[in-house]
Amino acid sequence: MSLKYENDMGEMVWSLQNYKEFFSEEIYWLTFLRVALYAILVTFLTFVVTFPIAFYITKVVSPKYKGFLIILLLMPFWVSELVRVYGWMILLRESGVINYFLVSLHILDKPIEMLYNDVSMIMGLVYTSMLFMVVPLISSLDGMDDSYIEAAHDLGASKFIIFFKIVIPYTAPGIVSGSIVVFMLTLGNYLTPNLMGGKNSLWFTEQIYNQFIASFNWNQGAAFGFLLLLLSSLIIWIGLKLTKQNLAKALS
């Protein structure tokens, strides 16, 4: 959190100029807005992908296989994010595994570039965030009594009603806690957008990095870092108010 600013005489003075720079320069606040929207999208997609997995493990599969499936789910996350991102790059690049099989099966005439665009970047962000959503969901679903679902089904409730009136409200604390973690990690992610995103996929953390490393403007970088924390916390607070959820209950 930096309030220092270098004036025209080269002197360091206390000022809010570093924070004003964020709002006065369009590229900074537009980048943050774009990244925030992408982080919300990634959070939603991560929930959509992981909820069926969590439900299958806790409510469908036999209890004796539950531990084994959870271990299989966690195994890819035992290696670093860098290794996992490079794995996706090997699969998706023009000379990668997927293109090789598509060309070999004559589905494609020639390899296509699947990397360095927003779609591949979002896919990478969803994959790297899955663990932080699925664990709270498994914990919430595991504590839900199956008799609630059975009773609703016996009373004639449809699967749609059971899902939105029983399952979702019961697992809301797990959904909220997982969403908060995924949103914050996505918003503050640097590695995946930098490696899998295209030249137009500028992430706000990259702007912070450029201020520290490229421009050696530590005061500006510190101000941007604090604004990232402040604005992301504000978005989470608004989300909690809109969903009428309690942060303490979600994280307990």
Image (cartoon, rainbow, N blue to C red):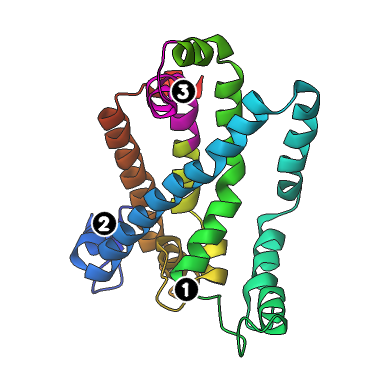
| Residue 154 percent location from the top left of the image | 48, 11
Farthest residue in the left direction? 24
Residues at circles 2 and 3 in contact by the CB criterion of under 8 Å = no
Mark 2, Cα crowd under 10 Å, few <14 / some 14-19 / many 20+, is many
Q: Residue at x 33, y 54 (%)?
A: 37
Q: Which residue has dot 3 on it? A: 167
Marks 2/1: CA distance? 30 Å
Number of the front mark, 3 or 1 = 3
Marks 3/1: CA distance? 35 Å
Q: State which tag comes first along the sequence, 2 or 3.
A: 2
Q: Residue at x 28, y 60 (%)?
A: 18
| Residue 192 percent location from the top left of the image | 56, 63
Marks 2/3: CA distance? 43 Å
Badge 3 element: helix
Quarter occupied by residue 238: top left
Q: Which residues are magenta?
A: 155-178
Q: Which residue has dot 1 on it? A: 117
| Residue 174 percent location from the top left of the image | 50, 27
Q: Which residue has dot 2 on it? A: 19
Q: Is residue 162 magenta?
A: yes
Q: Residue at x 45, y 19 (%)?
A: 170
Badge 1 element: loop
For residue 242, say whether it is visible: yes
